[in-house]
Amino acid sequence: MNRWTAAALACVVLSPATAAEPDLMVTRAGTRTERAAAQQHFSGRATVDMLHVAAAPARASVGSVSFAPGARTSWHTHPLGQTLIVTAGIGQAQRWGGPVVEMRVGDVVHIPPQVKHWHGAAPGSAMTHLAISEALDGQSVTWMELVDQAPASAAPVAAAVAAPQPSRAQQLMGAMAPKLAQLTDDVLYADVWARPGLSPRDRSLITISALIAMNRPDQLRSHLTLGRANGLTQDEIAETLTHLAFYAGWPNAVTATGVARDVYIGKP
Ligand code: MN
């Protein structure tokens, strides 16, 4: 094989038939812009990270929607239905006239076409879900009234859900220190905990680690419960306790282990 034949062969090898196809498209984590969900269609704070927007003729789009505790969508329908996949926290969903269903990490909820429904976070937990919807004639959602504004006579179940439930902070502190309870709900949980910069799971792990290090068993108990809802496993908490024994002190880790045992396994 002479030099020119070799060069010609190399060109064939380097110019496969697929060269005209577009490259894979990668948007890196942290490079997308999360935006606040449209206030007129949501109750409470929610943010949307559009992971994929369909380009015609494709029509399936995927968004990651994060809800602060108790936040929810308005009533709405999807022309071709919608699939929700919970990735953090505890959520709720309801179709018009049906019961409220709880959804947890890994649960997949499918909403059929044109079924009126809402979805959002449970009152005591933030929640993030992936939402996969297909557009029909460019439209993937039809918004309706806020859940709280639903006429009571039309759907008694919906009215029962709309009744405000006291938050955990209100239950614990409301009678004694109502302003502190309100700040806990409005600033700490509805704002700081709902910020997209950290996942609910990572926020839980950080908070639990700090409470173990500071030896705060009362707050640790409720944050372990929240952390479990945000996806922290018993094995991960066991590893955290063992790790922190070396950094936060043996007695702190031993005290926290007793609290974690109560939450994850039950009182002996
Ligand atoms: Mn929906």
Image (tube, rainbow, N blue to C red):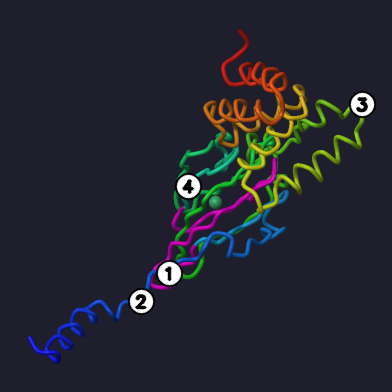
Q: Is residue 62 above or below residue 225?
A: below
Taking 91 as reference, is 82 left or right? left
Q: Earlier in the sequence, mark 3 or mark 2?
A: 2
- Label located before the other in sequence (1 or 4): 1
Q: Nearer the viewer, mark 2 or mark 4?
A: 2
Above or below, 21 relative to 206 = below
Q: What is the CA distance from the residue labelled 2 to the residue labelled 4? A: 34 Å
Distance, label 1 to label 4, CA atoms, is 29 Å
Q: Which residue is mark 3?
A: 176
Q: Residue at (89%, 36%) from the top-left corner?
A: 180
Q: Residue furthest bottom?
A: 4
Query: Which kind of residue does numbered mark 4 sit on?
Result: Ile
Between 83 and 240, the one nearer to me in the picture: 240
Disc 4 from disc 3: Cα separation = 43 Å
> Which one is in front in this view, the residue at disc 3 or the one at disc 2?
2
Residue under label 4, please give it.
111
Measure the C-alpha gap from mark 3 to mark 2: 63 Å
From which residue to which does the magenta span run?
52-81
Name the residue that disc number 2 marks: 22
- Three-letter amino acid code of the residue under disc 2: Pro
Give the number of the mark in front: 4 or 3: 3
Asked if disc 4 is less than 8 Å from ligand 1, the answer is: yes
Q: Secondary structure at mark 2?
A: loop
Depth check: 123 or 52 in front?
A: 52
Q: Is residue 33 left or right of residue 79?
A: right
Which residue in the protein does label 1 denote? 25
Q: Is residue 24 magenta?
A: no
Q: Residues within 10 Å of mark 4 (few under 14, many from 20)?
A: many
Image x and y of residue 154, in percent = 64, 41
Helix, strand or loop at disc 3?
loop
> Label 1 is placed on what type of residue?
Met
